[in-house]
Amino acid sequence: MRKMILIAATAALGSIGLTIMPAGTTAQEADQPALSLEQKTTLRCAAAFAMVADGQKRGNPEALAYPALDERGKEFFVRSSARLMDQTGLDRRAIASIMQREAQDLWDNDQVDQIMPSCLLLLSASGI
């Protein structure tokens, strides 16, 4: 089941234009700058939004309990990714790789429901 959810999250991330890289460390990942707490939170929330939006699309009752995230979640993801690329110098592939790890961590530790209230506040504060 976890593999299916991760595949769905990967598909959700890929559907907004990011190429998901397989697990493993690339040379660029080894050279990545340390992310600030704000940057890491933004990435985790973007991953959570993608996972929940995919669940909503599939009719998952738990995901449907949240506000619709298809359009707003995608916009948050796109803007946040662009801002992070500007701030860190990372390219789309590196951001996608980090996002995939965040999605996996959220799933492995069953934390999506724990972080969604804070992420929804971040989404509202972003003006999206």
Image (tube, grey):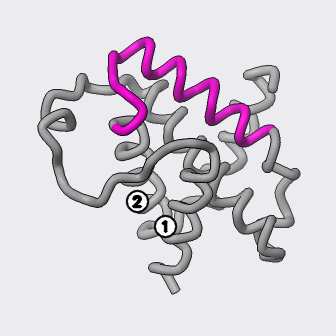
The numbered mark at residue 107 is 1
Q: Secondary structure at mark 1?
A: helix
In x, y percent, where is residue 96?
Answer: 42, 43
Residue 128 shown left or right of residue 105 in the figure: right
- Residues tagged 2 and 1 counted as in contact (Cβ below 8 A): yes
Q: Nearer the viewer, residue 26 or 127?
A: 26
Q: Secondary structure at mark 2?
A: helix
Residue 127, quarter of picture: top right
In x, y percent, where is residue 23?
Answer: 26, 59
Query: Mark 2 is on which residue type?
Result: Asp
Q: What's drawn in magenta, residue-wise?
A: 72-93
Which residue is rendered at x = 33% and y = 24% of the image? 90
Which residue is rendered at x = 37% and y = 38% of the image? 93
Q: Give the class, few, some or many, for how many residues have Cα within 10 Å of label 1's Cα (few <14, many ≥20).
A: some
The residue identified by callout 2 is 105
Query: Mark 1 is on which residue type?
Result: Trp
The quadrant of the image that shows the C terminus is: top right
Which residue is rendered at x = 37% and y = 27% of the image? 91
Which residue is rendered at x = 15% and y = 28% of the image? 31
